[in-house]
Image (tube, rainbow, N blue to C red):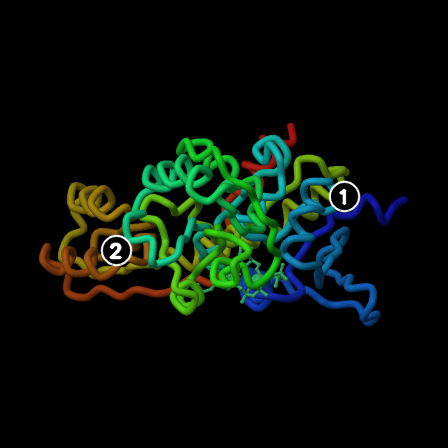
Amino acid sequence: MREAQKLVIASPSKGRLQENAAAFFARAGLELTQGRGARDYRGAVAGVEGAEVAYLSASEITRRLALGEAHLGVTGEDLVREEIADAESKVELLAPLGFGFANVVVAVPQAWIDVRHMSDLADVADGFRARHGRGLRVATKYVNTTRRFFTRYGVSDYRIVESSGATEGAPAAGSADLIVDITTTGATLAANALKVIEDGVILRSQANLVASLAAPWSETAREAARIILSRIAAEEEARTTREVRAHLPEAAGDLLREAETTFGASLRESNGKSAAFACPAHHVAALADWLIAHGAKSVASARFDYVFRAENALWSKLAARLG
Ligand SMILES: Nc1ncnc2c1ncn2[C@@H]1O[C@H](COP(=O)(O)OP(=O)(O)OP(=O)(O)O)[C@@H](O)[C@H]1O
Ligand SMILES: O=P(O)(O)OC[C@H]1O[C@H](OP(=O)(O)OP(=O)(O)O)[C@H](O)[C@@H]1O
Ligand SMILES: [Mg+2]
């Protein structure tokens, strides 16, 4: 009974997301340990009471989140949209994680030279049965995603051929006419003489940190989630922010305020001779140039390890949904 009250974090145990997910938790200073039992695939979070880790495939993680059998998980948005009916009400996508990028696309044989847009595909579908005596066949494991997208574009006369592997081979093998599948580099599509329909990118997916709204959010689970999310948020802010220190002849207030608004930086301290900003990492060079142009003698930037805030944005987002 007490076990069931713990926070369950589901982390990919195999496939494309495994290594990056482990690295993501490690960066946040969360050491996930794996239990000994190879059958068990359960672990813990070092130093965080009340949390346990379930190592599962990305697809199984998505299913458990929907069922409320895991509280937090790392999985692809493509799987969330496909596997969870009414995803908005069952889970909360807390944060995109910057890895596991892949597009879910509609792809047809390159030989279909007249088919470039979804409207062309709708025309083909309409005339296909008259010409071939049967409707179009679409090979995919993204059944729900395909149905929603095809309906939106008025493609109606088709049949789905469920495919769980080597989907790209289906048209050449003669078991389907076109496919809906996930692609990153496009190499597999090209190797199978397929092309992506121009407006046929259904979803630009990446790995997300996802919370279940259906899970039993006991006090223990909430407290563990709050701690874990504050570390994740602190690491994320540290990774995307730099401290910028400038030695200025006179740290005029107007100048500092202009620096803040122009570069999205926030002034942390200033004392007439020097000023320190927290600045988005991608604006550091521009801010430094600008400060030097406005009289700074030197500008140095440094990384933070963690930036903890009283207001934890990730936890606030989740708490608001949990009520
Ligand atoms: N090139 C890619 N191909 C497929 N998935 C990718 C790719 N890049 C990132 N992903 C993401 O990784 C998720 C898991 O895919 P992966 O193929 O690793 O699963 P798996 O654990 O091997 O399970 P399965 O056996 O069902 O494929 C995808 O749903 C997607 O979100
Ligand atoms: O656009 P690309 O970079 O070529 O990647 C796309 C391929 O990668 C995935 O398969 P995966 O290697 O995961 O094998 P699987 O089908 O066994 O899951 C996906 O199903 C595509 O087949
Ligand atoms: Mg795969």
Instruction: Count numbered badges in the picture.
Output: 2
The foreground one among 38 and 204 is: 204
Whole-percent x, y for residue 78 in the image: 53, 48
146 w.r.t. 289: above or below: above
Q: Where 240 sits versus 221, above or below?
A: below
Residue at 85%, 49% (x, y): give it.
3
Which residue is found at the position 54% from the left and 43% from the top?
94
Residue type (three-letter) at the residue carrying disc 2: His
Q: Is residue 271 visible?
A: yes
Quadrant of res 58: bottom right
Q: Residue furthest right?
A: 1
Say few, some or many: other residues with alpha carbon within 10 Å of mark 2 (under 14 / 14 to 19 / 20 or more).
some
Residue at 10% x, 55% y: name it. Answer: 294
Give left or right: position of 49 versus 163.
Answer: right
Type of amino acid under label 1? Thr
Identify the image quadrant of the N terminus. Answer: top right
Tag 2, which secondary structure?
helix
- Foreground residue among 223 and 137: 137
Ligand 1 resides in the quarter of the picture at bottom right
Toward the top, the furthest residue is 323
Badge number at residue 283: 2
Of 174 and 218, which appears nearest the observer?
174
Q: Marks 2 and 1, Cα distance to the nearest angstrom? A: 40 Å
Q: Is residue 127 above or below residue 295?
A: above
The percent position of residue 220, horizontal first and vertical second, equals 76, 43
Residue 119 placement (x, y as % from top left): 33, 37
Q: Is residue 230 visible?
A: no
In this figure, which residue is indicated by the disc labeled 1? 220
